[in-house]
Amino acid sequence: MNSMSRNISPTIPRGEQESMTNVVIIGSGNVATCYALALKHMCHIKQIYSRNLSNAQALAQQLHCDATSDLKQLAHDADIYIIAVSDDAIASIATSVPDNGALWLHTSGSTPLQVLSCCRKRCGVMWPMQSLSKSHPTLLSQAHLFIEGSDASTCNDVHSLASIITSNVHQVSSHDRMLLHVASVFASNFANHMFTLAGEVLNEAEIPFDALLPLIKTTIAKLDHMLPSQSQTGPAARHDINIMNKHLDMLTGIKHDIYKLISHSIENSHP
């Protein structure tokens, strides 16, 4: 092993390690950390790879495994390799490491299976529809995992691995996974940005964002027993043009444009 890698003595007895599925995690960010911690009790996490060695070592320390920042030092004898890196780095990693016959997975919502199947015989996808963070790794157990495999047998293997993490496992195509990713952007990323803009509006009156929390929580809680379209309220749903125009007069720039566009969409959805 070169100077860019470090062995950390495992605490799992060697005989038990050999009977467990050996997994290499490629990545050390939020998704990589959540997968590693979710699998550590049922699999032997053999190695963590990251371009930043200190990041790899920090995660490896939690898992009592090897860490490396050199793809040439990637363990060649693992059963499963999980690529949990930024979307634009998946292909370069996959093509930099020879196919060793193991199962290779990526965790992206928007990257097709083909990015791996062009250079791997056994490959798949295991994408979590969840906003993950290192500080809340258990969120992965509550997520829906959307999987894909290069063939039926491989897909079964991916399903078995995903089922260790959560009972919410679904097989979908790359195309449908992309649609799911688009939906998640609307439901999570865009919604969160709306909270940011709402906070900026409140800042003008020096009102803390906390004032919105009961409203936000109630809006989300309603989704447990009704569709979003059924719980829609507000001036646009009522077609209250007078109130909407007063709001627009108070807004400028991008907030004015967003308010007008979304109000128009709500009006069309509630004729």
Image (spheres, rainbow, N blue to C red):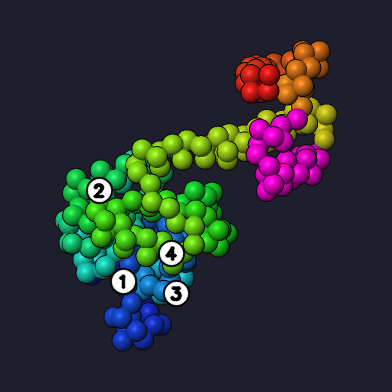
- Residue, disc 1: 22
Total marks placed: 4
Mark positioned earlier in the residue sequence (4 or 2): 2
Query: Disc 3 to disc 4, how far (Cα)?
Result: 13 Å
- Residue, disc 3: 41
Query: Disc 1 to disc 2, how far (Cα)?
Result: 20 Å
Q: Whole-percent x and y of residue 218?
A: 76, 44
Mark positioned earlier in the residue sequence (1 or 2): 1
Q: Magenta region: which residues?
A: 208-233
Secondary structure state at the residue bearing disc 4? helix
Secondary structure state at the residue bearing disc 3? loop
Type of amino acid at the residue the image marks with label 3: His
Q: Is residue 165 visible?
A: yes
Bin the neighbour count of mark 1 within 10 Å (Cα to Cα): few under 14, some 14-19, many 20 and up: some
- Residue, disc 4: 163
The numbered mark at residue 189 is none
- Residues at discs 1 and 2 in contact (Cβ within 8 Å): no
Mark positioned earlier in the residue sequence (3 or 4): 3
Mark positioned earlier in the residue sequence (3 or 2): 3
The answer to if 50 sits in the magenta stretch is no
Query: Disc 3 to disc 2, how far (Cα)?
Result: 27 Å
- Residue, disc 2: 116
Type of amino acid at the residue the image marks with label 2: Leu
Type of amino acid at the residue the image marks with label 1: Asn
